[in-house]
Structure formats: structure tokens, C-alpha cells
Image (cartoon, grey):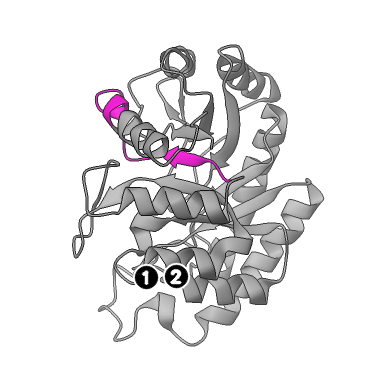
């Protein structure tokens, strides 16, 4: 199975420095977040000015990885698609299209996102969180269908990541979402640590198997909100990789929540679990 690295936490490295470092440790796949010292563009749950990311600059960034023998599997977008203001949702879809164009310049056609989060800072917290209000489900489905049309236009696909405190709060809810959206351009990124509070591992793969194109490999203590690096929480990693090998052998395992100081420990943990399961990491 392919083992890769999310670049989110490597803010102290340039793209070329990071590529050379990861290549030296045998990592040949990355999930690119534009958080590196020479490409600080990523903004979680929002949008940023990417006007300086010209085609030439995009090709330079991609070349930094490819010259080191590293493939860019996908690009992290994570803009806010659940925002209640229609003009904000439109602006965020426009931003998503800009990111798809950036990916096209890099030769990347897979993008990842969450539904997003919103809480009005000027109003009391609602009795029912926005994510679960009646009007939001059909609106999010409609937004995802708009995103599917954009993906179709550029021959791309978008992977939605679930999280137990967000719109895609469980494996079943995520499955229902994908069934209703009804597009092969809208796929799933399964982060098992994000759902372990509500779902068993078997349930996650049984519900979402047909839609999963990528897996995040991090960890989380039960009943604790913050995620941690692989091997530092309560996730049953041997069972996780066994299910991944059975249901989604094509999907890369992307290590997350690590940076320059600790990625080697998480990488060693994941590789060790894979090897003990008789699965060859690559």
C-alpha cells in the first residue's frame, strides 16, 4: 500500500527542502497543502489570495517534488462550503475553481476538503448547530453538485473528509450524502480518527468503501477532541490497516498531524504495522 505524507505541518521547510527530506526517508507520495515557507497560501475554512500562483510558479512547486521522485496525490483546499450566506458560498466555489486550475498547472486532479464550519460571532449559539439544521442538508447537497460540475469541467475529483463534529459527522451520514449527490466526481477521504468517537472501524469501511479514494493516517484519544500523530492515540492501527487492505487497497495512507520534528516516528509506526500485517508499504 502507498504511504504518503500531508505537507500541512512542515511550515519550516521550502517545497524543495521538504521533498528532499521526505525522499531521503523513502516517502514517494505527498498530499500538498500550500503551507511551506515559499508557498504560504493555505487557509483552513476560508480562502486566500492565490493570484501570485502563476502557471510557472505552480510548475516550479510541482517540479520540486517530482525531481525528488515524489508524486503529488492531491491538493488540500478545505474552503467553507456550508456558509449560510449564498454570496460567500459562491465566492468559495470560485476559489475552489482557482485551486483546481492551480492543480491542473501542477498536473494534479484530486482535491480534498471538508464541508466547512460556521458560527455567527454576533449571535448566540443556536440550539441546533448549523451543520444539523433542516435547511442545510439540501443546501450542502446542491453545493456539492455545483462542485461536481466544476470537477467535471476540469476532469478532476473532490474528496470530502468527515469529522464527528461537522456536517459529515458519521460514516452513515457521509454515505447518505454521497448517495444523494450522485456524482463519481465527489468522493470520500476517510480519516478514521475523525469518526472513531461515533463509528467502529468496520462500520466506516462497510459504509464508505465504494467512495473512498484516500485515507488519513493520524490518531486520537477516545473522548478527546484534538487529533494526534499515528500511534499516539487509541486507534487500533493493526485493524485499521487490515480493513484498508481489504476494502481500499488502491487508496494511499497519508500521514497527518506531523512535521519535521516528529514525522519519522509516525512513519515508522505505520510502516511497522503494515509489515506485521504482511502488507508491503511503498
| Quadrant housing residue 202 | bottom left
Q: What residue is disc 2 on?
A: 203
The residue shown at (29%, 71%) is 122
The residue shown at (48%, 88%) is 134
Q: Position of residue 182 (x, y in %)?
A: 71, 71
Q: Secondary structure at mark 2?
A: helix
In the shown orientation, is residue 39 left or right of residue 11? right
Q: CA distance from mark 2 to mark 1?
A: 6 Å
Q: Position of residue 4 (x, y in %)?
A: 48, 33
As drawn, 17 above or below 106: above
Q: Secondary structure at mark 1?
A: loop
Q: What residue is disc 1 on?
A: 199
The residue shown at (29%, 76%) is 123
Give the main secondary structure, helix, strand or loop, of the magenta stretch: loop
Q: Nearer the viewer, residue 162 or 25?
A: 25
Residue 264 within the segment the image draws in magenta: yes
Residue 96 within the segment the image draws in magenta: no
As drawn, 69 above or below 119: above
Q: Are marks 2 and 1 in contact (CB under 8 Å)?
A: yes
Q: Is residue 87 visible?
A: yes
Q: Position of residue 192 (x, y in %)?
A: 39, 57
Magenta stretch? 251-265
All told, the count of numbered labels is: 2
Q: Nearer the viewer, residue 130 or 243?
A: 243
As drawn, 24 above or below 3: above
Q: Position of residue 256 (x, y in %)?
A: 37, 40
As drawn, 157 above or below 144: above
In the shown orientation, is residue 61 left or right of residue 118? right
Give the class, few, some or many, for how many residues have Cα within 10 Å of label 1's Cα (few <14, many ≥20).
some
Q: Is residue 79 visible?
A: no
| Quadrant housing residue 193 | bottom left
Amino acid at each position: 500500500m502507498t504511504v504518503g505524507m500531508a505537507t500541512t505541518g512542515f511550515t519550516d521547510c521550502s517545497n524543495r527542502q521538504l521533498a528532499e527530506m521526505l525522499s531521503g526517508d523513502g516517502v514517494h507520495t505527498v498530499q500538498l497543502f500550500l503551507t511551506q515557507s515559499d508557498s504560504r497560501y493555505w487557509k483552513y475554512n476560508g480562502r486566500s489570495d492565490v493570484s501570485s500562483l502563476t502557471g510557472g510558479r505552480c510548475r516550479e512547486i510541482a517540479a520540486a517534488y517530482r525531481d525528488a521522485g515524489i508524486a503529488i496525490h492531491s491538493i488540500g483546499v478545505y474552503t467553507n462550503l456550508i456558509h449560510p450566506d449564498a454570496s460567500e458560498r459562491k465566492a468559495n466555489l470560485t476559489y475552489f475553481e482557482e485551486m483546481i486550475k492551480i492543480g491542473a498547472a501542477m498536473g494534479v486532479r484530486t482535491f480534498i476538503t471538508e464541508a466547512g464550519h460556521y458560527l455567527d460571532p454576533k449571535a448566540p449559539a443556536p440550539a441546533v448547530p448549523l451543520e444539523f439544521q433542516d435547511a442545510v442538508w439540501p443546501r450542502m447537497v446542491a453545493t456539492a453538485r455545483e462542485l461536481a460540475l466544476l470537477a467535471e469541467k476540469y476532469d478532476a475529483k473532490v474528496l470530502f473528509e468527515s469529522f464527528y463534529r461537522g456536517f459529515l459527522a458519521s460514516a452513515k451520514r457521509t454515505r447518505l450524502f454521497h448517495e444523494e449527490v450522485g456524482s463519481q466526481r465527489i468522493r470520500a477521504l476517510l480519516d478514521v480518527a475523525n469518526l472513531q468517537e461515533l463509528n467502529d472501524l468496520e462500520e466506516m469501511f462497510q459504509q464508505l468503501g465504494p467512495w473512498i479514494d484516500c485515507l488519513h493516517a493520524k490518531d486520537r484519544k477516545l473522548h478527546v477532541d484534538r487529533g494526534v500523530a499515528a500511534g499516539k492515540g487509541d486507534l487500533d492501527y493493526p485493524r485499521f490497516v487490515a480493513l484498508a487492505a481489504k476494502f481500499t487497497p488502491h487508496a494511499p495512507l497519508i500521514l497527518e498531524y506531523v512535521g519535521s520534528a516528529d514525522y519519522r516516528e509516525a512513519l515508522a509506526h505505520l510502516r511497522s504495522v503494515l509489515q506485521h500485517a504482511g502488507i508491503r508499504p511503498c
